[in-house]
Image (cartoon, rainbow, N blue to C red):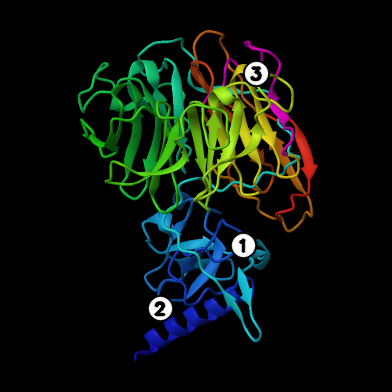
Amino acid sequence: MSTKTISCFLLLLCSVLLVEVKSQFCNGMAQYDHCSSNSGCACLYIAGTINIGICIDQFSADCFELFKCTQNNLCDNPEQYRCVHHPRCQSTPVCYPIPTYNRQLCPPITMTNITTTTIVPTTTTTRAQPLVNIPANATWAQDGVTIAGGHGQGNVTNQLFYPLGLFVDDDQTVIIADYNNHRIMQWKKGDTTNGQVVAGGNGKGKGLHQFNGPTDVLIDKETNTLIICDRGSQRVVRWSRRSGTTQGEILIDDIWCWELAMDEHRYLYVSDVEKREVRRYQLGENNGILVAGGNGQGDELNQLNEPRCLFVDRQQNVYVSDLYNHRVVNWSKGAKEGVVVAGGQGGGSALTQLSHPGGIFVDTLGTLYVADSNNNRVMRWTQGDKTQGAVIVGGNGQGEGANQFNYPIGLAFDRHELKKNKSYKKVKIVFGNLQSAISSGLAVSLLTFAIRMISHRPAKIFFTVSDRIISWAASKILQLKMYTITPNVL
């Protein structure tokens, strides 16, 4: 063995030992396994080693922010960065930040018997839903900036016409189901002038190059494709994101779909408003397994009355916005009936009620966020109080004001990270919110909040409201509101 090779090996070994001081190894686990009680942490293999990994927050940085490792699988600052393989970086070795508080951030899952404590892995394959921790007492400010659309209803690339479902990619690209334009639009971060048609846009129809009122869209990262609910054509289709794609392929047919979700094992969930049910599909099959409803129209706990929007958590629990029952229902994996987790007290505007709930999201603390469409507000329902929710934005009537909405429907989050700042025991946060700027039609609007001083980029909430997307930038120039809180996740 050459002297150079030995030196490189010793340097690699030393840097591994340095890392162990502030993080635990996850030896014996499969790459990318869930390794901590913090669901955002995963086992990332150290480049140049065999089955040696670090249990670390896998969402603390985006690939475009990272540097590739040297040829010897090293990083310039081994005390703060580690050369690892990462699932979202095509497994190319990258220098990944290892925070000093990593042991506290990613505590291991343990199973204790008489003599031993063993780390128990849980297999995962892909991140379908963003992992978001938002303090339950977070406060939201009220102003926004249009970042897409806002030029009236129409079919040119700077317009939207009744947008419904949307998906937010890791780089904050927003993919939108532009319902009345029969197309899927893409708006990249920073480009507020024009969107890009990425599927359809060839008129209303049932051809493989067309849509008939698409209601939802998501990205399958494994295949780099869009999966689209083409409701008017009663089908779910897949469309490649590669340049030059001119038509899609049918995944599921004969289904009055409304919304889609995908779990970490790449099972596809589809709500069927005609059959009042939600089914889980393995990609390539057409029948699926019933996971919610399917017992006719009604308001019993084993029934749904037009299931619309979906959210699936890491345990494959399915949350459904039950439109005409004015409630959100959680169906645990394998359950024969659901549990009402919001609303269910008839349609109304009280804090115990919802009226035609739309988009939903559940963060890792179990807090539920609901676009309460008819009440023109967004509500938050915490684990600690499931009897009533709190209005976090809107609730000031339907209109064009900065604190108003115009029938919010779709809702999506991108991720955000809480990063502990060495100099502060508390975390200062700036929050932003969205509005609908015109009263006619529907728009895609964007609700933004930012972790002041500690996050490398803002996280955002997105949902559909009028003919535009609105963003609240949190910068030193645009200071909205400042709050000081102590998140219990740190």
Which image quarter holds the C terminus? bottom right
Q: Is residue 62 left or right of residue 328?
A: left
Q: Residue at x 74, y 26 (%)?
A: 351
What kind of secondary structure does the magenta stretch mostly adopt? loop
* Inter-mark Cα distance, 2 to 3: 56 Å
Q: Are marks 3 and 1 in contact (CB under 8 Å)?
A: no
Q: Percent position (x, y) of residue 425?
A: 79, 55
Looking at the image, can residue 372 be seen? Answer: yes
For marks 2 and 3 on the same chain, the one whose residue lies earlier in the sequence: 2
Q: Give the class, few, some or many, for how many residues have Cα within 10 Å of label 3's Cα (few <14, many ≥20).
A: many
Question: What residue would you read off at disc 1?
Answer: 37
For marks 3 and 1 on the same chain, the one whose residue lies earlier in the sequence: 1
Task: Kindly identify which numbered label has been placed on residue 50.
Answer: 2
Q: Is 420 rendered above or below residue 152?
A: below
The answer to which image quadrant residue 18 occupies is bottom right
Q: Which residues are magenta?
A: 386-409
- SS label for mark 3: helix
Question: What residue would you read off at disc 3?
Answer: 375
Q: Is residue 197 left or right of residue 412?
A: left
